[in-house]
Image (tube, helix red, strand yellow):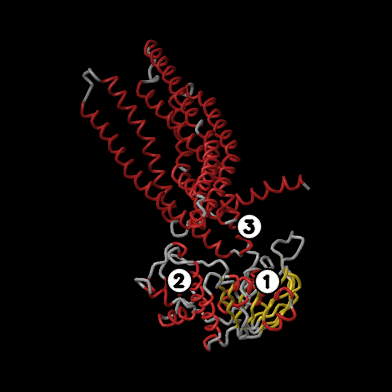
Amino acid sequence: MAKKEKTAKPKREKGNFKRGLAMFWSFLKGYRILTFLTPFTILFDVYIELKLPEIMGRVTDYIMYHAGTDSFVRHDLNMLLLEMLGYTLLTLVVGYFTARFVAISAMGFGANMRSAIFNKVQDLSFDNIDKFKVGSLITRTISDTARIQSLFSTTLSVFLKGPIMLGVALKKSISISSEMSKMFYYAVPGIVITLVALGMLAVPLFKAMLGKMDTFNGTLRGNISGMRVVKAFVREDYERAQFEKINTDVAKANIKAQSLIIYISPIIMFIMYGCLIFSLRRGSTTIIHDALAGVEGGLTYGRLTEFTSYINQVLSSLMVVLMVFVSMVVARASIIRVAEVFREQPTINDDDGDPALTVKDGSVRFDHVSFKYSAQAEENILEDINLTVGSGEMLGIIGATGSAKSTLVNLIPRLYDATEGSVYVGGEDVKRYKFKNLRDGVSVVLQQTMLFSGTIKDNIRWGDPDATDEQIIEAAKAAQAHDFIMEKENGYDTELGQGGNTVSGGQRQRLCLARAFVKKPKILILDDTTSAVDTETDAKIRAALRAEAFSGITKIIIAQRITSIMDADRILVLDNGKINGMGTHEELLKTNDIYHEIFVSQQEGVLAQ
């Protein structure tokens, strides 16, 4: 079994790598014309660069063999220099357009890739998100994308230029001196072996470094999000120490990965300058020998100058080509990681949903429903749940921590799918609905309140983008949020800041309630969303839920306090994922030990205060 796992992983990574490369084309949408124009400007640039050594050689020969003689004509020399200047200016113009095309294409490519990752994440289910972890998704969207974008930019700008320059410059150098060109037989393999070996050795090191970055981003995100808790418990020193440890691990992993790459430049430069020294030594000897022997048409100073320029072009082009290869090898880990996100198939999809089907009423039915978060888990979180909630009914749910209360209600809007059995909303299996149609009919206020940057009005309008100001105020009043909103200087136009950090926990809960209320759904699910408000405000919210405006809405309320649900039509008692009791407040006090025990303990707590 272990052997199969070892062989399967590289195959899957190879598939992800190929899939990642294949996706490049889709990321070029909107920038393909500029991408196709780039090769033409590069070809023109190559032509100019190959032309300059030839002119330089002619200038050198003209000076060496005509200076101080009657045949020297300054006009001829000036014409050669003007020709060189003209090509140099052309290089400037062509280089500008090439750089501009590459920059725009690469930036657009990166932006499209980030958008594609973000859109893909929006399609993933909770189960998929749990698998990747938030910190890892952030790293893939930012760091990995930047690395792939850099590879794309490098490939586009130099990879096409490199092989052409290499081939033509090599041909020209051989035409000047086939004898001196033999040194390429040794130099080229040396460069290839060096770059490939160092590149391959760097791959696992860069992969480990990216894994460290995942941990770093996750830790940083958690620390900044929980800054108030850190300060409340005076844990700044502890968090600094933790951050330094993780930051040091990232730095060490990065240094270890980069330590191999930094050897490339000095090794290549050593080979290049070695070739230059060899050609100058061999060329000088040949020129002197030909001059003494009176050989006609032999090697000249200008041709030697031209040859040394082609040497630099040959070896530089080879280095550029192989550096792109090394960059691809190094970026391989990033390509695989990004491809993994696109390869991930949502564990929940609405492909079979009926676009015409909408939630007609707020009835809910659980038919022998069992659930576990992982297929490999031995035990179910929910076990054989049978439950019917009538349209317009108010159902309270209570139970000890870990009794799967939140898990139960998350199955209604299909945030997760039941492992066994079926969940029905409005008389239809939830799997028959399109997500939008189902979730338009179900409004959920999750246990973890979440507000977004923007104004209070913008956040409430999340529930209904078309809501009028009057409807927003009405929802805020029902959620008991209107008064504290109006106490703020800008009222509903008050900016909330990152995550709503400018309001208290209880105020955040009430704003989230207002966001759910303005939606006017068929089913309203409140997952312990009044835990941070005082009992008086809690009572007012419950009274609002009993008002005429909510009469046709099914209310499912999870609470820790019995007072929050005691006036519900029925109360469900959950214990370890199983239904332990069902009835009104009075009935459960008489018949259910768990409910009675919770009630007594909470009453004793109130009396003790």
Whether residues under marks 1 and 3 lie with C-beta atoms below 8 angstroms apart, the answer is: no
Percent of width and height locating residue 155: 48, 45
Pick the front one: 190 or 499: 499
Whether residues under marks 3 and 2 lie with C-beta atoms below 8 angstroms apart, the answer is: no
| 388 shown above or below 262 | below
Q: Amino acid at mark 3?
A: Lys
Q: Is residue 541 left or right of residue 411?
A: left
Q: Is residue 291 visible?
A: yes
Percent of width and height locating residue 119: 53, 63
| 580 shown above or below 199 | below
Q: Earlier in the sequence, mark 2 or mark 1?
A: 1
Q: What residue is at 69 percent from the left and 80 percent from the top?
A: 365
Q: Is residue 333 left or right of residue 428?
A: left
The residue beneath circle 3 is 131
The residue beneath circle 2 is 459
Q: What residue is at 37 percent from the left and 49 percent from the top?
A: 100
Q: Earlier in the sequence, mark 3 or mark 2?
A: 3
Judged by depth in the image, the label closer to the viewer, 1 or 3, is 1
Q: CA distance from mark 1 to mark 3?
A: 28 Å
Q: Which mark is residue 327?
A: none
Pick the front one: 124 or 604: 604
Q: Quadrant of the C terminus?
A: bottom right
Within 10 angstroms of label 1, few (less than 14), some, or many (20 or more) residues? Answer: many
Farthest residue, direction right:
1
Quarter holding residue 307:
top left
Q: Amino acid at mark 1?
A: Gly
Percent of width and height locating residue 209: 56, 43
The residue beneath circle 1 is 399
Whether residues under marks 2 and 1 lie with C-beta atoms below 8 angstroms apart, the answer is: no
Q: CA distance from mark 2 to mark 1?
A: 31 Å
Q: What residue is at 40 percent from the left and 39 percent from the top?
A: 46
Q: Secondary structure at mark 2?
A: helix
